[in-house]
Image (cartoon, rainbow, N blue to C red):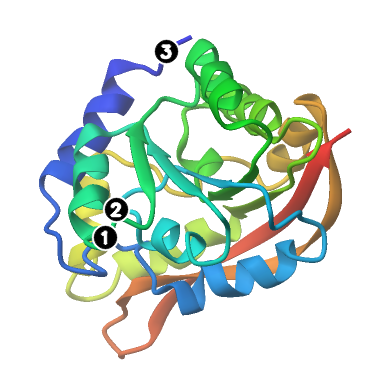
């Protein structure tokens, strides 16, 4: 199965038109606001001697941090342009990056054969995927985990749509980083909140822990407050 060309081109266009400046992408939060607190939730359940795969790694900000906590960190992304960003930013070559569609089941299996069981970091990927692609994304997580791996999954809830709508309707219109998301036909918070745990279960995963959270963005409202999007996190393993 392959992703629709519209979806692939939307992401290529977005990353081709994004600079290398840290935080230029609206979701490119500092690891202190993302990977660090997320790993604190994953750590009690995960074998830290396994590699970790950052799925939908974008420009690799979180992957580079994950590489300091695991013996090997691999970032994968649908977009060639995103991977190019990630490789340029990784000046110390602490991580590995490769272009990969999570809906390409053959390549996902090949990655698992190459790496063995891995832990997985999946932040805000399912909600951005087109509906037919969401089950394969969850199945990719299950494939990569194998028997020993554990995954941290964080996805926006439906309440995020309200936050984004209010930000977009400010007197000056959407703030610049949010406007770029809309201009490139990306669709944040497109999945139902209840859909995510259903997808995980249908992929043969069991939820070990979960809870509400927010995903801090790098964009601010006109009053100077940061846009933090409501989300839910899950730590999962193969059932």
Q: How many residues crowd around disc 3 within 10 Å: few (fewer than 14), some, or many (20 or more)? A: few
> Counting residues from the N terminus, which is met first, the one under dot 3 or under dot 2?
3
**Which residue appears at 39% of the width and 82% of the height?**
226
| Relative to 4, residue 221 above or below | below
Across and down, in percent, residue 15 comes to 19, 45
Between 122 and 160, the residue placed more toward the observer is 122
* Residue at 53% across, 21% down: 108
Instruction: Reply above or below: 169 against 225.
Output: above
Circle 1 packing at 10 Å, graded few (<14), some (14-19), many (20+), is: many
Q: In terms of secondary structure, where does tag 1 sit?
A: loop
Q: Are marks 1 and 3 in contact (CB under 8 Å)?
A: no
Image-based side of 90 in relation to 94, left or right: left
Q: Label 1, label 2: how many angstroms apart (C-alpha)?
A: 9 Å
Name the residue nearer the viewer: 79 or 75.
Answer: 75
223 is higher (above) or lower (below) than 163: below
The residue under label 3 is 2
In the picture, residue 82 is in which quadrant? top left
Identified at 40% across, 18% down, the residue is 3
Disc 2 crowd rating (10 Å Cα; few below 14, some 14-19, many 20+) is: many
Can you say which quadrant of the picture contains the C terminus? top right
Q: Which mark is residue 59?
A: 2
Alpha carbon distance from label 1 to label 3: 25 Å
Circles 1 and 2 in contact, beta carbons < 8 Å: yes
Q: Position of 187 compared to 11: left or right?
A: right
Q: Earlier in the sequence, mark 1 or mark 2?
A: 1
The residue pinned by badge 1 equals 25
Q: Position of residue 155 (x, y in %)?
A: 59, 52
* Lower sequence index among marks 1 and 3: 3
């Amino acid at each position: 199965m392959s992703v629709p060309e519209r979806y692939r081109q939307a992401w290529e266009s977005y990353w081709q038109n994004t600079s290398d400046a840290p935080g230029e992408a609206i979701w490119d939060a500092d690891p202190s606001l993302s990977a660090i607190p997320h790993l604190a939730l994953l750590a009690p359940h995960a074998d830290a001697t396994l590699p970790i795969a950052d799925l939908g790694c974008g420009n690799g900000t979180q992957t580079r941090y994950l590489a300091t906590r695991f013996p090997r960190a691999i970032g994968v992304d649908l977009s060639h342009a995103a991977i190019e960003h990630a490789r340029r930013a990784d000046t110390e070559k602490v991580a590995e990056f490769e272009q990969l569609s999570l809906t390409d089941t053959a390549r996902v299996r090949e990655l698992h054969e190459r790496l063995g069981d891995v832990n997985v970091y999946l932040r805000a990927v399912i909600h951005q995927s087109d509906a037919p692609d969401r089950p394969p994304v969850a199945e990719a997580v299950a494939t990569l985990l194998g028997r020993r791996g554990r995954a941290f999954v964080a996805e926006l809830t439906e309440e995020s749509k309200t936050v984004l709508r209010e930000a977009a309707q400010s007197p000056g219109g959407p703030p610049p980083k949010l406007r770029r998301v809309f201009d490139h036909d990306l669709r944040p918070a497109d999945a139902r909140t209840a859909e995510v745990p259903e997808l995980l279960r249908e992929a043969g995963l069991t939820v070990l822990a979960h809870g509400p959270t927010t995903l801090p963005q790098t964009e601010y409202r006109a009053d100077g407050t940061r846009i933090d999007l409501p989300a839910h996190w899950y730590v999962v393993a193969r059932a």
